[in-house]
Amino acid sequence: MQRTIRLRPYAIAIILIGLVFSALNYFLVNFVRSMFLRRLEEESLNYASIYSHSLVKSREAYRAINDLLEQRLLMASSTAALFSDQLSDEALRALADSLSVDEIYIYSPAGIIEYSTRPEYLGWEAPPGHPVHEFMVSGLASLVEDIRRDSESDRYYKYAYLRLADERFVQLGIGADFVQGFLSSFELQRTVDEIGGFHLVDHVCFAGPDFVVLASSGEHHHVGMSLEDPAVKEAVLAGRSYSTINRENGQEVYDIYVPVYLADEFVGTLVVGKYTGSTEAALRTTSFLVFAGTSFVCLIFIYTMYTNYRHNQQLVSLAYHDTLTGLPNKEYLLEVLTVRLERGDPASSAVMLVHLRNLSEINSVYGFAAGDRVMHSMAERLAELVRPGRKLFRFSSNRFVFLLEGYGSREELVEFAEGIRLQVEEGQDPLGHHLAVGIGIVELSGSHQGPEEVLTQAAIVVQHLQNTQSPSSYAFFDVEMAARLRREEIITQELRRFVASPALGTVYLHYQPKVELATGKVVGFEALARMNSPSLGMVSPAEFIPIAERHSLIVPLGYLVLERACGFILRLNYRGFTDLHVGVNISPSQLLQEDFVQRVGEILRETGIEPHRLQLEITESVLIEDFAGIAAKLHPLRELGVTIALDDFGTGYSALSRIGELPIDCIKIDKSFIDNMVFREKHRLIIKDLISMCHKLGLRVVAEGVEQDIQRRYLLESGCDVMQGYLYSKPLLEEEALAKLA
């Protein structure tokens, strides 16, 4: 893997960019042209659609106006009917003038004209079959006829009829000449001329169903011509619009052909045309601007590539090499390992994590600058071991990594590890100190999921060497270490399943009695979690509780323990032991949950126990990390009514002056203090003073881990309140604890 910046890729990239921008410019110019034409087509289609709609609306408007005329006739008839009992012939003629109608007749129920604007028709009787007679016998309240010829005058009228309450009826008429004149503005040529007069188009014509032009805007020189293009006819007859570019008078014109329908009947084709000269001029200007713009952008991009190349030459070294030693760094290592593992055949490859154990001492005593000089010196020494197939990396502040490829056997790895030890430990650092080294060896295999897993395993080996204080300076990540990891995985999964299904019973509770020293009576119990693994058998709390904490299971597990402890308090109530309390250990993670107080309150309400019967035990070490935060958490718990105990007191170096600031009820002296007081007078005095001071603070004192009678006697003499330990009883199952009370 080459982590350098070469000029050739940049040169190729610049050439490709030039070609791409040239092609882009060509296609962009054509795209702009197509966009202009498409935009023109869309606008033209929109115009054509609007104008064809106008032609259709000519007919629709005719019908609408005809309806308005009919309404006008009916309204005039109604007005005449209002005055039908008071009219004379003269008044009727005056009413006709005011209503702008030509004729008004009032008929008797028998169909005889009683009043008329035309005296010569007085007494006229409608014969059977006549339109007037047909209305008279129809029973209709009103009627408006289409234009018809009057049977007496041979003139054309549009008549309306209205029946009166006494079976008489009124007839009004408007002359056909007025109606036709009112609608004449909707002629085809007039419509086409009006459309052609707008600036949106250059010419318009309308062709009939036979594709012969019936009307044309301008000088009407298209009238009589026929649309001969088969593609136009095919599209229009299929109900589709069609567009094409034609030449007319030496200019390009964009013609849109739109079919026109009336009530699903094809009535003709509307042709809308627009010259493209202005569009072409705009296109040429736009093309020039596009070319200039893309060229400018291309030049900027090429310049940026060049400056980026110069800048990256400086950054690559910083990104993939350690500034102190000049060696490839952790990021480089991760990429190399990733590639190696992705090949699918990492055999004969190994990682050696070289840990300088006492470099931190040099940093502490001489300062970090001195430590940096030592690391630089170590890097130079280790670099002397680099060969083909061996790569050296600076991994962290006090660690290096060798990546070996193509080695023959484990013996070769051991030999090389010994060579590293000799190179580091047998030479002196610039300050004259001898450095100790620990080397974790991991052989790559197909089971490794990624570089982080490999490096984690190597770190586990280094930690193993440091924790066990092994005389050897190196070790392999072996089956035993993997087994420990596997064991932890099994415990984690079984705890996870138990949290999801508590009925499995993987984790259960023992209860250890707390005995009042003065009376020898049991005053309470401490609930202690135990684990019976289906796969591993009994697992110590010292093992499964840290695992639960590492894998974020301690919080749900803690709530399950709390619920079961409250259930035990209920059983104590049923047996009549209503004055005993039960203590439950609370992990720091659980205590710091935002809803912890709320959850405790819910459990108390659900179980129905009295809050003071529950005692929550927190470890002293928690206070050192966040005294104010823990104190803030404890106050609302005390307000609920539960009691608080400070567990493992004496292991966290708490000050009694600060203990007095906490809302707690008692302290529990750690077993280590109780054990030492048998052999050390000083511890006995400390415990006696401690008990006295706690009493002055109003706190009860519980001694943990009491196993000998001499311890009990001294605690009693010192005024200790309660003891807990194997001297009285080991932790018991629930039934055994109840039996102990009996």
Image (spheres, helix red, strand yellow):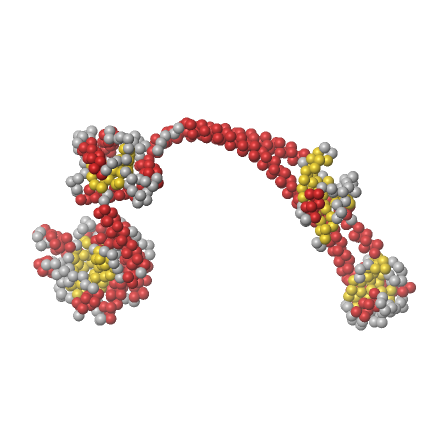
Q: Is residue 644 visible in the rendered structure shown here?
A: no
Q: Position of residue 7 (x, y in %)?
A: 41, 27
* Residue at horizontal 30 percent and vertical 45 percent from the top: 447
Location of residue 463 by image quarter? top left
Task: Say which residue appears at 71% left-offset and 43% top-offset.
Answer: 230
Where is 264 relative to 606, above or below?
Answer: above
Estimate the x, y position of residue 391 in percent, counting from the top left.
28, 33
Point 21% across, 53% down: residue? 542
Q: As rendered, which of 108 and 62 lies closer to the eye?
A: 62
Q: Nearer the viewer, residue 319 or 701?
A: 319
Write down the quadrant of residue 35 in the picture: top right
**Which quadrant: the C terminus?**
bottom left
**Percent coordinates x, y for residue 195 in the rendering:** 73, 44
Q: Residue at x 33, y 54 (%)?
A: 594
Q: Vertically, is 10 above or below 505?
A: above
Spot occupied by residue 355 in the image (x, y as percentages of width and height): 23, 37
Quarter holding the N terminus?
top left
* Count of labels in the image: 0
Q: Would you place residue 570 above or below residue 342 in this image?
A: below
